[in-house]
Image (spheres, rainbow, N blue to C red):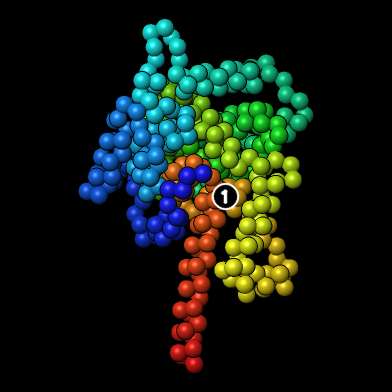
Amino acid sequence: MQKIQKVNLAILYNEKEEYKSQNRDTTRDELQLIQKFRNLLNQKIIPTDQLKGLAWQGIPSELRGQVWKILLKYSSPNKDANVLFIEKQFTIMERKRNQYYEMCNIYFAVDQQYDDKERRILKLISDDVKRTLPDAPIFRNSTVQSMLEKILFIWNIRNPACGYVQGINDIVSPFLITFMQEYIDIDTKKMAINPQLEKIDPILLKQVEADTYWSLCKFLESILDNYTQYQPGLKRFHERLVDITTVLDKKLINHLQEEKIDLFGFVFKWSNCVLLRLFSFDVGLRLFDTYMAEDYYFNEVFEETLETQFRRYNVFIRKIAYKIMDRG
C-alpha cells in the first residue's frame, strides 16, 4: 500500500470546518482546489499518484464522483479508453454497467421465484434499507430504497463467501449519493429530497445504480475478510487495536480488562460500517476521500486515525487533570 501521508484527525475531521455543499457559495480557496483537480483531470493520461495526493486533502463535491471512479479503477485514467469506439467496443465502465443490468434482469425478473433463504435475505435487506440514515429524508424515497435493495441483494448473491452483512447498507450510501450528485444537487448536511430526483432520466438512474454496485464491490475487496466466516480480518484488527491501546494508554487497557470489557465489540461496531455511523454524512464523504486516496485500505487508515485520536485524548485528559490539581 502506498502511503500518501499520515492520517491527522484534526485535518480529517474538524468540527469547526464548514464542509462544502454544492448549494452554497464557493470560496476562493475552494475554487483554487477545484482548478488543481481540473488540471489533473484534463490531462490525456491522468497522473493517479498526484490525484491521490490531492484527494487526500478532500475532493470538491462536484468532482467527487469522477475522481472516485478513477481511484477505484472503474474509470480509466487514460481518456482515450473512456471513449466508445465506432465498432461498438465498449469501455470497461460500459461493459460493467451492462453486466449489472443483466444481473438485475435475472435476479429481479417479474416471474422470479425465490427460495426461503433468499426471501429471508430480501426481508433483512429491506428492513436495513429502511433503517439506513434514518434522519435523512432522501433515504426515505422509494426510488432510492429500491436502488439500494437491488444493489445489496445482488451483492449477496454474487458474494456467497460472506453474503450480505448488516453495515454494508451504510457503506453503499456514500457511493449512491455521490454518483447522484453528478446529475442533481444534494445538500449533504440536510439530505433533503431534491424534487429533481424524480425527473432524472431512468437510464441515468440505472447507470448510477450500476456504478454504485461496482464501486461497492471494489471498495470491499480490501476488507472482505472482515465479513467472511470467523472474521479473520476483524480478529487481526482487534489484535492491532489492543496493541495500539496498550502502547498509548496502558491504564485504559488495564481498566478495560479489570471490567471484563472486550474491545472486539467496538471493533465489530466500528468496522462493519467503516466508521460512517460515528460521523455526519458530509464528514463521512470526506472520510471516504481519504479511503480512496489510500487505496481504500480502511483498516490501516483507521489504525492511524485511532492512534491520532488517542494522542489527542491523552493531551485533553492531562489538561483536565492539571486544572483539577490547580484548583486543589
**Residue type indicated by callout 1:** Asn
Tell me if residue 154 comes above or below residue 292 in the rendering: above
Quarter of the figure with residue 260: bottom right
User: Where residue 136 sits: x, y (%)?
Assistant: 48, 45
Quarter of the figure with residue 151: top right
User: Where residue 2 sits: x, y (%)?
Assistant: 47, 44
Front-lying residue, 110 or 58: 58
- Decide if residue 312 is in sight here: yes
* Residue at horizontal 34 percent and vertical 28 percent from the top: 45
Tell me if residue 110 comes above or below residue 211 in the rendering: above
Q: Which residue is mark 1?
A: 299
* Residue at horizontal 68 percent and vertical 35 percent from the top: 163
Front-lying residue, 9 or 281: 9
Residue extending farthest left: 28
Tell me if residue 120 comes above or below residue 321 in the rendering: above
* Residue at horizontal 67 percent and vertical 16 percent from the top: 111
User: Where residue 232 sits: x, y (%)?
Assistant: 70, 47
Quarter of the figure with residue 42: top left
Q: Is residue 319 left or right of residue 25?
A: right
Q: Is residue 310 left or right of residue 70?
A: right
